[in-house]
Amino acid sequence: QVQLVESGGGLVQAGGSLRLSCAASGSILSFNVMGWYRQAPGKQRELVAIITSGGNTNYADSVKGRFTISRDNAKNTVYLQMNILKPEDTAVYYCNAIKLIPNQNYWGQGTQVTVSS
């Protein structure tokens, strides 16, 4: 059973930065896609950013130009660098990992990010 552990959340003022980390219990090379999602109170969970095993990335329009997803295969860790944070970025951020064959989907426990105005 793969475990994903997020860290790096916290309280920050608008305009500030945070870096989230997602550490996997095994090699992240086995995952086809890894990503970050977020869920604000009363809202559905939404995609923030994904990165493929080949290093391709994709971002939600709301975070393009401000957030950067990256991976360190040697450390089995995926990062989300968040800059120019806005109050609307406030949410619980979840790490996700997907294997296509066999079809497996893993989630972390989430880390809270709060941006004050």
Image (cartoon, rainbow, N blue to C red):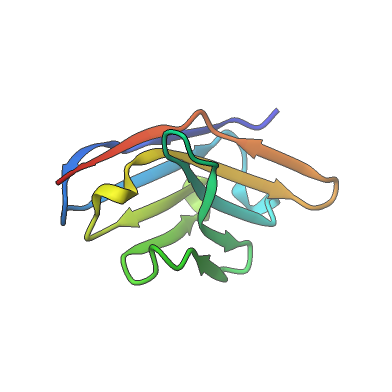
Name the side, left or right, on which 117 lies relative to 33. Answer: left
- Residue in view at x 53 percent, y 68 percent: 57
Tell me: 71 left or right of 3. left
Vertical comparison of 111 with 64: above or below: above
Q: Give residue 61's position: percent from left, percent from top.
A: 45, 68
**Could you tell me residue 16's position as x and y percent?**
16, 53
- Which residue: 57% across, 71% down? 56
In front of the other: 52 or 76: 52
Q: Is residue 45 left or right of residue 40?
A: right
Indicate the quadrant where residue 116 lies. Answer: top left
Residue 53 occupies which quadrant of the picture? bottom right
Residue furthest toward the right?
102
Q: Which of 39 and 113 is in front in this view?
A: 39
Residue 117 in picture, x, y percent from top left:
14, 46
Task: Give the farthest residue toward the front.
Answer: 42
Residue 14 spot, x, y in % from top left: 16, 51
Q: Residue at x 53, y 49 (%)?
A: 46
Quarter of the picture containing the N terminus is top right
Q: In this view, does 38 lie above or below 1?
A: below
| Number of numbered discs on residues | 0
Depth check, front residue: 88 or 28: 88
Residue 94 vertical position relative to residue 53 in the rendered view, above or below: above
